Amino acid sequence: MSSLRPFYPTSWLAAPAAAVLLLLTPAPQSHAQTQAAQATPAPAQSADPASPSQTAAAATSPEQRGVTARAVDKVKQVARSAADIFSRVPCLPPKDANKGGSKAMGSLPHVASKLVAGQPVVIVAFGSSSTAGFGASSPEFNYPNRLATQLRRQYPTADISVINAGVGGEDAPEMMKRLQTQVIDVHPDLVIWQVGTNAVLRNLDPGDTAKLVEDGIGRIQAAGGADIVLVDPQYSPAVNQRKENAGKMIKLLGKVAELRHVGIFPRFEVMRDWHENQSIPVESFVIADGLHMNDWGYACFAQLLGDDIIRSVGQIKLGVNVPADVRTYRPM
C-alpha cells in the first residue's frame, strides 16, 4: 500500500477514525510500565558458595540475566496489550470461512515440521506498507511483530525469527528486485507475501502483477521449498473505489496460489467479513487515510494467520497427513 497515500478519506471517516485510534492506542502508562520492567535489575544471587543453584547461575552474568528478564517482560507486555485491544472488539474468524469450497487447513508442512522438531524457524514477511506497519501506533503493533509474539508465546522454547521485509509504496515490480537478497538469501521456512494493493491503486494490469508473483513463487520454491502464503489487498475505502480492478487482482492471486500450490490468506474477504457480517465499522480497523489498517486490524490479521500456523503444527503432531502440494487455504 502506497505510503504516499494518494487517496484521502471521505468526511464521514476522518473524525470517527481519529476517535477510534485514540481508543485503540495503548495507554501511556502501558509504555511506562514496560520501561519500568526493563529497568528492573536481576534478582540477587545466593551467597552460599556450596549452593548448586549458584554454581549454575554463575555461568550467566548479571548483565545477561538482566537482558533475558527484560526480553521476557517485553513479550508479556505486548501480549497484555493485544488482549486489551481484543477485549474492546474481539477478533473472530470469518463466519463463512469454508464458503466457496475452500480447502481444509494443512497448508504449512515445512514450518510446522520445523516447530515440531524443535528446530529454528525463520519467517519472512514480504510486502509493502501494510507489512512495514504504516498506521500502527508503534512498531511492536505491526503484524509481523504481533505474529512473532503469538508464536513465541505458543512455543516458548522455540527459536522463531520473523523478519519484516516490508517497504512502503512497493508492489510486485519493485519487490522482485529485492526478492533474492531479502527473501531467498535468508533461507526462510515460511514466506508471507503481501502484494497487489499498490498495483490496484495505480491501475496497473492485474495480469502483469499475477505473472510477476507467479515467477517469484517459482524462484522461492526452486531455492529450497519454503512454505508460501500470499496475502491479497485489504478491504478499505481506497481499494473499494477501484472495485473492478481489485476484484480482478484478488481472483488472479487466488488462481496463482492454486496453480503453484501455495497458501492464500484472503485479507479482502476477511476484512469484509469484519464489516458486513460482524458489524464492525470500517473506521474501527482502518485509519483515517481510508487505506491502512490500525492496531486492531493488524492484531486481528496476525492472530488469524498465527492460528492457522498453530493449527498446522497440531495436525502434524497428531499424525495427520499433510501433503506438501495441498496448501491453499482459508483462515478458519
Image (cartoon, grey):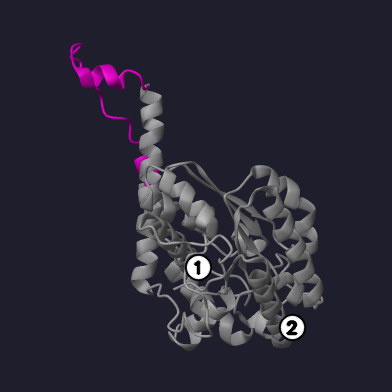
At which x and y percent is residue 114?
A: 48, 47
| Element carrying mark 2 | helix
Which residue is at a point 57% across and 50% down the rendered structure image?
189
At which x and y percent is residue 45?
A: 24, 22
Which residue is under mark 1? 301
Q: Nearer the viewer, residue 291 or 317?
A: 317
Q: Which residues are magenta?
A: 34-60
- Label 2 environment density (alpha carbons within 10 Å; few <14, some 14–19, many ≥20): many
Q: Are marks 2 and 1 in contact (CB under 8 Å)?
A: no
The quarter of the picture where the N terminus appears is: bottom right
| 316 w.r.t. 75: above or below | below
Which residue is at a point 37% across and 45% down the rendered structure image?
156
Which residue is at a point 68% across and 55% down the rendered structure image?
221
Q: In this view of the protein, can residue 277 be seen by the observer?
A: yes
The disc at residue 245 is 2
**Which residue type does callout 2 highlight?**
Asn
- Label 1 environment density (alpha carbons within 10 Å; few <14, some 14–19, many ≥20): many
Q: In this view of the protein, can residue 32 be seen by the observer?
A: no
The quarter of the picture where the C terminus appears is: bottom left
At which x and y percent is residue 207?
A: 79, 76
| 297 w.r.t. 47: above or below | below
**Which residue type does callout 1 highlight?**
Phe
